Amino acid sequence: MSPSTPMSPSTPMIPWTPDEQPPVPGGHRFSRRRFLAGAGGLMGAAAVAGVGGYWLEGHLASHGVTVGSTASASDGPILVVLTLYGGNDGLNTVIPYEDPAYASARGPMAVDPSTVLALRDGFGLHPSLAQFHGLWQQGRLAVVHGVGYPDPNLSHFASMDIWQSASPDGSQPTGWLGRWLDATGEDPLRALAIGPTLPLELSGAKVQGGAVPPPPLQLPGTPAFQQALTALGASAPPVPALQGDVAASGDDLMLLVRQLGPLFDGSGSASPAGGTNLEGGAGGLAIDQGGGGRADGGVLTDQLDMIGTMIKAKVPTKAFAVSFGGFDTHAGQLATQKALLAELDAAVPAFLAFLAGNERPVVVVIHTEFGRRVVANASGGTDHGAANVVLVAGHSVKGGFYGDAPSLTKLDDNGNLQYSTDFRSVYATVLDQAVGVDPGSVLDGRFPTLAFL
């Protein structure tokens, strides 16, 4: 059986010799953390959500962390990285509606200028982003223009790997926040993804963040399988090394419901945006990350509700990752993007309002893997492009425009916007001002920081 083969409750144990640990890609040997990070491949999709969340609980318990404990203002800001999967069309999000080249290129795909929410300098927000417009008026929304990198890749998967590794040439196999964990020796609890899988951005070489599934936080599978998971923690030493790792992980599985479960059982969870899908299970967060397939309605609100609940409970996490799919709009873009941006608008500003006055300010960075082509296609959509906008919101954010907006007429050879701000400058700013680490210890090289924090 290969490491990617799903294992059912009846799958026999692999006959490794007592002192043998199976190899993993790259020549690494299994550790407890690697076992847990890879548990989705071993146990199948139905078990991914359970294993990710229970892994977190083991670290809570082993570090003496309980609800309402150690986090304080001295820990600095909390970072939330929100990824819009599929390639959100930045030109119809932050709209250059006073530039005649915009309407000329977009034709019927251009947003009606009378409905645009005016910012300044001839730009405005999509009409679905009324609450974001309020953040702009409060000076709490920054728009970074022309974000990209040299020789852009127009593949969903390759582009997202570039963004999450901060490595356009593919030289870094780890995530940019994963390298922060490696560089600072932070506990994996310090970086959490909300959802059934761990994104590359939180994966380091030595330390990995955790993945927390949507509630209810309960063991996956049939009663027999749940019983088998419970039995994982029953082995007593001496046992072979891998069996000991499996036993320790099984013990971790049992602890989540006892400690984090009360946060999300319906009595302890506050809902900043009125989310009602907190018990949607792993399927509620399912997104086609490559193609940007849309998840269940309200999924972003649900993810941010979970983060808000953890922040209010002072779970000492420094960085969170959330995702929202559906932005691969090759056809029918106007209606699709209108609905998706409305969900974004319902979730993020309400999340920030819920945490207003929190002793640790929250910074939300919103990006996607690439922009869309300037000229609309014949199917009422736009094709894969290059440079795009990044939005940064929060009470400590210095609102306004940053970077130079790309020309709509001086395009690259593929008809795409040319970047003016390297995306690693956004990361450098966040690492320096929010995470509190030297960006040079994480990024390949030095990149100018921006003034939005």
Image (tube, rainbow, N blue to C red):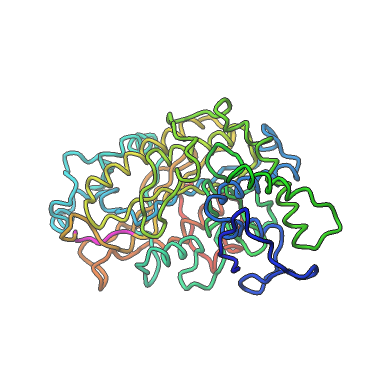
Determine the main secondary structure of the stretch shown in magenta.
loop
Task: Judge left or right: residue 160 versus residue 189.
Answer: left
- In reply to whether residue 375 is colored magenta, the answer given is yes
- Residue shown at the point (37%, 67%) measured from the top left: 155
Residue 256 visible here: yes
- Residue shown at the point (23%, 45%) measured from the top left: 335
From which residue to which does the magenta span run?
371-376
Residue that protrudes farthest toward the top in the picture:
267
Whether 280 is drawn above or below 198: the answer is above
Between residues 1 and 125, which one lies in front from this camera angle? 1
Residue 130, horizontal then vertical, whole percent = 31, 35
Residue 183 visible here: no
Residue 216, quarter of picture: top right
Between residues 147 and 160, which one lies in front from this camera angle? 160
Between residues 395 and 220, which one lies in front from this camera angle? 220
- Residue shown at the point (51%, 54%) measured from the top left: 429
Residue 75, horizontal then vertical, whole percent = 64, 42
Residue 300, quarter of picture: top left
Whether 213 is drawn above or below 178: the answer is above
- In reply to whether residue 174 is colored magenta, the answer given is no
Quadrant where the N terminus lies?
bottom right
How many marks on residues? 0
Residue 349, horizontal then vertical, whole percent = 41, 35
- Residue shown at the point (32%, 64%) measured from the top left: 386
